[in-house]
Amino acid sequence: MHETLEDFALNNGLRDVSPALKLALGLCCMLLSVSSPAPVAPLLIACSLTLVVLFSAGIPAGFYLKLLTIPASFAAMSILVILFLTGGGEVLVSVSLPGLPLTVTTGGANLAVLLLARISGGMCALFFISLTTPATEIFSLMRRCGLPAAFIDLSMLIYRYIFVFISEAEMIYRSQVMRLGYGSLREAIRSFGMLAGALFLRTWESGERLMVAMDARCYDGRFGALDETPPVSAPALVAVALYLAALLGIACLTMQTTIF
């Protein structure tokens, strides 16, 4: 999943668009989604960015929908709790369980819809950034913004070794499965403990090998990185500004909008 995200970020229809513009668009949409008092603007952000990702960037619809199921599973649990435990307004649905009466009111339903809209808009904006902007360009933007070099270098190392550790864990897990290491609950617990221990040791060894390699290459506390990001084009800048202005206007006009 993680490698596929980076592959799509390196090869998509919006690859030649300025990363600063894509990052600004995604961050503004996220802020607008989480701060909107009504569900109209976040839902509009989710729908519009989904169309951009599918048709302009050329991301496969099946992969994108599979990606959306990850936050949807967490959102469903939160929405169910808010739906039944938040009161206020007229009663829409009443369920009587032994010792646990549950009711759904208009206040709880509106809050659940607003939460769902905010999550949808924010996650679609985040996936827009991750599917269209490579991590190397984001690190270059961080360097341009004047963030500390140590913070940027540490972020680059962490991002790089996420994939290394996932690959190591996958190889260990596959070898355990081939040896029937997960045939029973007891064996699964034992195999998982061995996997965690082996991964910790390999992590430690990888860090030591990295330090030796960096010292051999005369590391002076700063990683060299190419900065070849495309510039911001005027038409794209105008289009993003108009889009954000329209979203802001819709959010202001629909502040009092409720579903129930």
Image (spheres, rainbow, N blue to C red):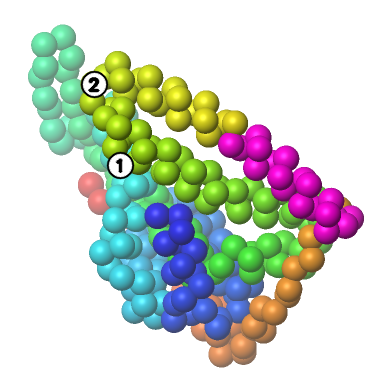
Q: Which quadrant of the figure has residue 1?
A: bottom left
Query: Dominant secondary structure of the magenta stretch?
Result: helix
Circle 1: residue type: Ser
Q: Residue 76, position in %: x, y?
A: 28, 40
In reply to whether residue 78 is colored magenta, the answer given is no
User: Which is nearer the eye, 260 or 223?
Assistant: 223
Q: Which of marks 2 and 1 precedes in the sequence? A: 1
**Going by the image, does 39 lie left or right of 106?**
right
Residue 220 in the image: above or below residue 79: below
Q: Are marks 1 and 2 in contact (CB under 8 Å)?
A: no
Crowdedness near tag 2: few (<14), some (14–19) or many (≥20) residues, C-alpha within 10 Å: few
**Label 1: which residue?**
73
User: Which is nearer the eye, 16 or 84?
Assistant: 16
Q: Residue 95, position in %: x, y?
A: 11, 24
Residue 207 in the image: above or below residue 124: above
Circle on res. 184? 2
Residue sitting farthest toward the top: 99
The residue that appears at 18% across and 14% down in the rendered structure is: 100
The residue that appears at 23% across and 47% down in the rendered structure is: 260
Q: Residue 59, position in %: x, y?
A: 36, 72
Circle on res. 15? none
Magenta stretch, residue numbers: 202-220
